[in-house]
Amino acid sequence: MATVSEHGLKRVVWQRIKETIIEDCKKSEIWKILILDHFTTKLLSSCCKMSDLMQEGITIVEDLYKSREPVLEMKVRHLDICTPYPTSILKSAYVYFTDYCSDELFNKMKLYCGKYIRVCKELNISFLPQESQVFTCDNPGAFRSIYSPHCSQDKVKTLETLAAQIVTLCATLDENPGVRYKKETVLENTTLDNAKQLAALVDYKLTKHYDMDDNSKKKGKTQAQLLIVERGFDPVTPILHELTYQAMAYDLVPIKNDTYKYKSKDGSEKEALLNEDDQLWARLRHMHIAEVSEQIPKLVKEISANKKQPDGKITISGLSQLMKKMPHFRKQKTVHLNLTEDCMNHFQKNVEKLCKAEQDLAVGSDVEGVKVKDPMRTLLPVLLHPHGTYDKIRAVLLYIFSLNGTTEENLNKLIQHVKIEEDREFILNWRELGVPIISSVSETSRAYCTLSSRRDRTQEETYSLSRWTPVIKDVMEDAVENKLETREWPHQSECPAAWNGSGAVSARQKHKASTQDERRSGSRLIIFVIGGISYSEMRSAYQVTQSVKSCEVIIGSSHIVTPMELLDDIQALSKPTTTKETFTIVKE
């Protein structure tokens, strides 16, 4: 297993960092110090390890916000400096910005510490590569800034920032995509057009970026499309109980910062990082939980076998390396057996009873395909059972979504039944996302995709408690097949004609999975969801990519959400703005 993540976006970002920061002073034999702010610490952590940096001659990584003693005998390589740094501690500095450096800041640096700076560059990497085909802008607060009525003054600035970050993603991938967006929504005489605004900003900044390209050549549109959509487009997917491994684990098990804590057989507490460096996790994460347990031992054997030489033989050195890695494989197996058991315990205790009702409400029919005529009869058993408050809220929301809103009288009864009279914002604030809650709203104002417009998947094999398909997967497949209606998905800027069908193959046709490099020579579809993406939607990007020979699907958002996190964010929309976070210099 390679030390550096060799997967998609992470590999591209690490390569860009090596080609700029590392190469700039590689000729020097002097060891270097890398000084990072909070965002660039996350950026580096997402695509490399300390051992990788050590191999490149970087001996120390330090926090920008902490003061330090002079280290005059060492070169300092400084990534994403935010304020001029005291010059007395530097012998020389290589300064890099992940985003645009303003003229004001550049002139200050030139004035106060110009003689110490050997290099000053903009990297254009202000996004986080979360997975091989998933990125975020590392900005959970964007949800509140865009949708809260208390933060209307912050919205434009937030959209500007997100647009700039999306442009750096495109630049990192060397893409200049055609931009489209989901048509704006009108709800209660209010127009929700955040996708339209963001699309215009992204297209403007893309044009400006490539006009200023180092090659002094205007870059034309590439074989890529960028689709921008709001969270209210599909309110169902992010609150359903999911039974695929990754989505289920993050919903039911307390996993923080991708770290899973569990107890070993001797009772000691262990930690495991769930990322793509864990090959077992990468292979299991999109499987249904019913398949995971039996697949774990098979995949451990398969991964071990893949460490052999190409001719199937194992050399003495190869065997030595394999034996060194065996404890790691055994640990991965233990981790995932524990995590699977945790998921199944939650499922059998509580979730199983919820899933049938949730699926029937979401899909609009039961497992036999019979239409749900009275959604209240489906909801009632959930309300009568002693489920937790969050679970009941999720079921009530699915009921309301299935009806495109309910009456105010019925809504009040539901709120009383769930006992959230003081927290009714969990339900009412969905209106801020353009989702109808009160049924007096006309049918045409619906923010999200209607069941009648969904793809027919009745012939696909599914588990009875996993019949729902994220709406974004329909969008991905329609985009690849050039079936998106211009009326619903207006063009902010056109894609090259070559996108329209020549390299786009039906996502329903089965192809042998192509390598990432092969797909890179084809088309790219980039999806950006304003307001957070769910793990189910992330999975859809991989599924469509695997089904299509010549198009890679990348999905991103301001942040990744779990059902409970999204509900908390929804409730908080009506709360007054809190004091912003501040940073102070800490002297060690």
Image (cartoon, rainbow, N blue to C red):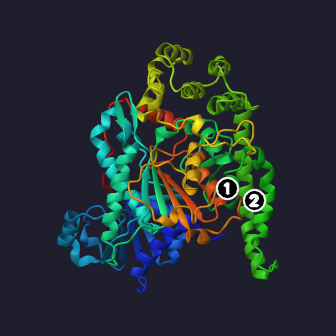
Estimate the spatial distance between the alpha carbons at disc 2 and disc 1, rounded to whole Å: 13 Å
Rendering quarter of residue 96 = bottom left
**Position in image of residue 485 (x %, y %):** 49, 48
Question: Residue drawn 64% across and 55% down?
Answer: 507
Figure check: 573 above or below 483:
above
Asked whether, in this view, residue 428 is left or right of residue 581, the answer is right
State the image quarter where residue 501 is shown.
bottom right
Left or right relative to 340: residue 159: left
Q: Position of residue 427 (x, y in %)?
A: 48, 26
- Please say whether residue 454 is visible from this viewpoint: yes
Residues 145 and 32: in front is 145
Quarter of the image containing the C terminus?
A: bottom left
Number of numbered discs on residues: 2
**Three-letter code, disc 2:** Arg
x and y percent of residue 260 in the render?
A: 62, 48
Disc 2 target residue: 330
Check whether the beta carbons of the residues at disc 2 and disc 1 lie within 8 A of each other: no
Q: Nearer the viewer, mark 2 or mark 1?
A: 1
- Front residue of 533/369: it is 369
Residue underneath mark 1: 281
The amino acid type found where label 1 is placed reads Trp
Instruction: Report the residue that reaches farthest toward the left.
Output: 111
Instruction: Classify mark 2: residues with Cα within 10 Å, few (<14), some (14-19) or many (20+).
Output: few
Quadrant containing the N terminus is bottom right
Work out whether 149 lies above or below 98. Answer: above
